[in-house]
Image (spheres, rainbow, N blue to C red):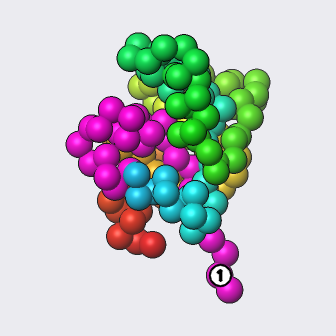
């Protein structure tokens, strides 16, 4: 039996769903695929506070906290460490530090990145797909 695809899911895929942004249904398909065990899903630990700070704007604290843990259920977390932060801050190819953190977190688990914003990942050492492309491929 072939190994399951190993994917690193960018925070914006979760935001698609929680804010019902364009393409959110495909993003939900990716998340549900991880939860069903079709793919090995990874996220950066930085994803949790980012999602919390977005949810707290529209939900009470306790509800926002619960929502976030429900959103990331089934995902393995890549610990954020000094090495990832250092690599990310020194990589001038990225316009956004958070995107660089996501990229270097994904590299630690050798996973393809599923993101809504492919243009934010100028380094193409690994495969970078949007949710629709990933679902068509699998």
Q: Nearer the viewer, residue 73 or 122?
A: 73
Residue at the image point whose x is 42% and y is 25% from the top: 95
Q: Tag 1: Cα neighbours inside 10 Å, few (<14), some, or many (≥20)?
A: few
Percent coordinates x, y for residue 126 in the rendering: 53, 55
The residue nearer to you, when weighing 114 against 14, is: 14
Measured as percent of width and height from the top left, residue 109 is found at: 69, 51
Q: Dot 1 corresponds to which residue?
A: 2
* Above or below, 21 relative to 3: above
Quick check: can you spot residue 129? no
Residue 96 occupies which quadrant of the picture?
A: top left
Q: Nearer the viewer, residue 105 or 43?
A: 43
Pinpoint residue 3: horizontal percent, then vertical percent: 67, 75
Q: Where 55 sits versus 128, above or below?
A: above
Most distant residue in the left direction: 22
Q: Is residue 134 left or right of residue 32?
A: left
Farthest bottom residue?
1
6 magenta-colored: yes
Indicate left or right for 130 with 41 as reference: left
Residue at (41%, 62%) from the top-left corner? 134
Foreground residue among 51 and 119? 51
Q: Quadrant of residue 39?
A: bottom right
Q: Quadrant of the C terminus?
A: bottom left
> Residue 85, relative to residue 44: is it above or below?
above
Residue 98 in the image, given as x and y percentages of width and height: 52, 26
Q: Residue at x 51, y 62 (%)?
A: 33
Q: On the rendered image, what quadrant is the N terminus found in? A: bottom right
Q: Which residues are magenta?
A: 1-27
Q: Is residue 96 in the magenta section? A: no
Which image quarter: residue 12?
top left
Secondary element type, mark 1: loop
């Amino acid at each position: 039996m072939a190994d399951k695809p190993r994917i690193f899911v960018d925070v914006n895929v979760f935001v698609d769903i929680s804010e019902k942004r364009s393409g959110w249904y495909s993003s939900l398909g990716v998340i549900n695929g991880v939860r069903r065990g079709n793919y090995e899903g990874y996220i950066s630990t930085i994803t949790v506070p980012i999602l919390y700070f977005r949810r707290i704007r529209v939900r009470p604290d306790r509800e926002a906290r619960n929502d976030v843990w429900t959103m990331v259920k089934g995902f393995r977390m890549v610990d954020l460490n000094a090495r990832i932060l250092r690599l990310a801050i020194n990589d001038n190819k990225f316009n956004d530090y958070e995107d660089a953190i996501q990229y270097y977190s994904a590299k630690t688990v050798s996973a393809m990145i599923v993101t809504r914003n492919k243009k934010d990942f100028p380094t193409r050492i690994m495969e970078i797909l949007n949710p629709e492309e990933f679902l068509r491929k699998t």
